[in-house]
Image (cartoon, helix red, strand yellow):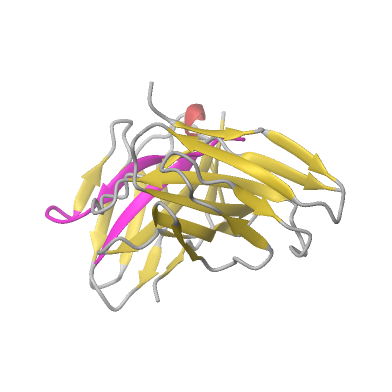
Amino acid sequence: DGGITQSPKYLFRKEGQNVTLSCEQNLNHDAMYWYRQDPGQGLRLIYYSQIVNDFQKGDIAEGYSVSREKKESFPLTVTSAQKNPTAFYLCASSIMGQDDGGYTFGSGTRLTVV
Amino acid sequence: AQSVTQLDSQVPVFEEAPVELRCNYSSSVSVYLFWYVQYPNQGLQLLLKYLSGSTLVESINGFEAEFNKSQTSFHLRKPSVHISDTAEYFCAVSPRGNTPLVFGKGTRLSVIA
């Protein structure tokens, strides 16, 4: 079955360490997105990519970095510069040129920094 | 820039009662509108969408939403809720043209037996 996989589901890190969240899709979707979810804040866009080797900052990109070396993969690195990294992170993908809101979401990674 | 306002952060309702989750948006251009549902510790699933045509759209599990252009609203309704409808619901907007969805802050629907 096609889908989008985020790993790990739970992640614990010490303050000051960089950490990379994995997102892989086998839907042949062109576009991929990273959102951050905090209680009462909804989903806020961190980064998105519409083609390989290209990506754009979202509303809250500071302290995060991404890469898009392959169409299937869009890893997110939470750096030590991110002031409050503990959150639920959601990855999504969609077909470019198809504006029907057909985002497919992964099941999320809950990051806790101690 | 687009923005989405979900007026209620939490909505408790008794089982088999009707419910309305409110959503207003701001945009200077034509938009597409969506409702997504999230069950605990999961990703989001598309519930229904308005792209064009009939302003009343329905989902397979009994929810419906009506696009009201003059009031810039897209409220979600269900005439009779079930325990299994307990979840968080997100309204989202997309201006036409390959830009990312903008989400509201969500409404937590709690159905009480």
Image coords of residue A103 (percent x, y): 38, 45
Relative image position of residue A27 (x, y in whole percent): 35, 34
- For this orientation, the residue located farthest to the top is A1
Q: Left of A110 or right of it: where is A44?
A: left
Dominant secondary-structure state across the stretch colored magenta = strand
Asked if residue A107 lies in the magenta stretch, the reply is no
When the figure is inspected, residue A71 is found, relative to residue B85, above or below; the finding is: below
Q: Nearer the viewer, residue B38 or A12?
A: A12
Residue in the picture at 32% in, 44% down: A102
The residue positioned 65% from the left and 60% from the top of the image is: A64
Image point 34% across, 42% down: which residue?
A29
User: Horizontal placement of A114 versus B77: left or right?
Assistant: right
How many numbered marks are there? 0
For the point 62% across and 58% down, which residue is it? A65
The quarter holding residue B70 reads bottom left
Q: Is residue B42 magenta?
A: yes
- On the image, the x and y values in percent for residue A111 come to 72, 44
The region drawn magenta spans B31-55
Spot occupied by residue B38 in the image (x, y as percentages of width and height): 51, 40
Q: In the image, is residue A53 above or below residue B27?
A: above
Q: Quadrant of the N terminus of chain A?
A: top left
Q: Is residue A12 left or right of residue B78?
A: right
Work out whether residue B7 or residue A78 is closer to the camera in this orientation and state it: A78
